[in-house]
Amino acid sequence: MHKTVLTVLVDNQAGFGCLAEHGFALWIEHGDERFLLDTGQGSALAENVRALGVDLGRTDALVLSHGHYDHTGAVPMVLGAAPESRVYCHSGVTEPRYSISGGEARDIRMPLFSMRALAALPMERMHWNGGPQLIGDGIGLSGFIPRWTDFEDAGGPFYFDPHALRSDPVNDDQALWISTDKGLIVCVGCCHAGLINTLTHLKEITGQSRILAVVGGLHLGAASQERLQKTVQALRDIKPGLLVPCHCTGEGSIAFLRDHLDCPVHTGYSGLRLDTSEL
């Protein structure tokens, strides 16, 4: 099995020498391959790769978990640094997206300059994946994640239009998985499909029953008490080895998970490094 090291490059919280930003980006060193899951909004990634000594020029593939601005703002920078890198994302990442609260609509779609950067890529480098797909040796993508549970939703008031006429279930949401001899490492951007839906789907498509670790945003910031309780109940059955909630999980929800689960729950932050061989 390959050695895998994960480094959080962008998060809402930051360790010493790094910048915090509402967004997420995760650097994945897997054997001789290098993958970047999401890019944050932009400015934090540029500063943090310097602070952490990460060479984006070594990026073999950029994976976009979904098409929101806080995950796609530095796409042009990454593609400029790694002009031969491949890109993987769902075809829905460029859809118009809005968050509507208190009658006010906020545009949260991928920035236009990032869309243009994707559109300019040669066809052989652009991979629109709607279903499961391998992107390396023992590393793959979930593709569309079916919504099975009755207690999980997209995690917010998301719409395709500014008038709240068309609800957006964020069907472009996908997760990245890494196979190890101890189980799956699951990397998520925002987990809009729901954490339990995501883990259930990945266990089904990979045939692996053990979840070694989950790293990334879980979008539980606005979760109801009922959703949190049912999530914990399901996680007790799944028995993950480690949770590293980041970005959009919410401090209160992280505390709830920590108080009600047997596995370690470590809050993520920009600069966090995780050597999976030590898990």
Image: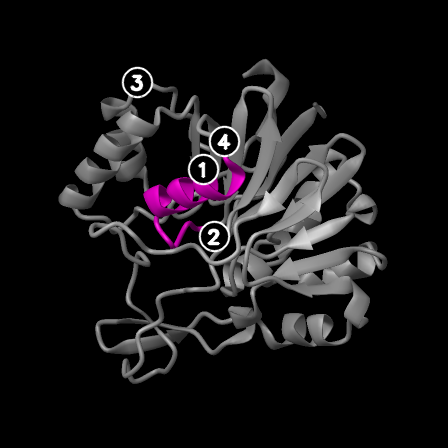
Q: Is residue 207 left or right of residue 240?
A: right
Task: Say the numbered circle drawn on residue 255.
Answer: none
Residue 34, percent from left and from top: 75, 40
Mark 1: which amino acid?
Lys
Q: Gap in Å between the C-alphas at discs 1 and 4?
A: 5 Å
Q: Gap in Å between the C-alphas at discs 2 and 1?
A: 30 Å
Instruction: Identify whether 140 is placed above or below 138.
Output: below
Mark 2: which amino acid?
His
Which segment did they paint magenta?
A: 190-207
Task: Say the numbered circle drawn on residue 203.
Answer: 1
Disc 3 marks which residue?
Answer: 262
Mark 4: which amino acid?
Gln
Q: Which residue is located at x 28 percent, y 67 percent?
A: 157
Q: Gap in Å between the C-alphas at discs 4 and 2?
A: 33 Å
Q: Is residue 185 left or right of residue 217?
A: right
Q: Quadrant of residue 84?
A: bottom right
**Callout 3–callout 1 Cβ contact below 8 Å:** no
Residue placed most toward the observer, 20 or 236:
236
Q: Earlier in the sequence, mark 4 or mark 2?
A: 2
Q: Gap in Å between the C-alphas at discs 3 and 2?
A: 29 Å
SS at circle 2: loop
Q: Earlier in the sequence, mark 1 or mark 4?
A: 1
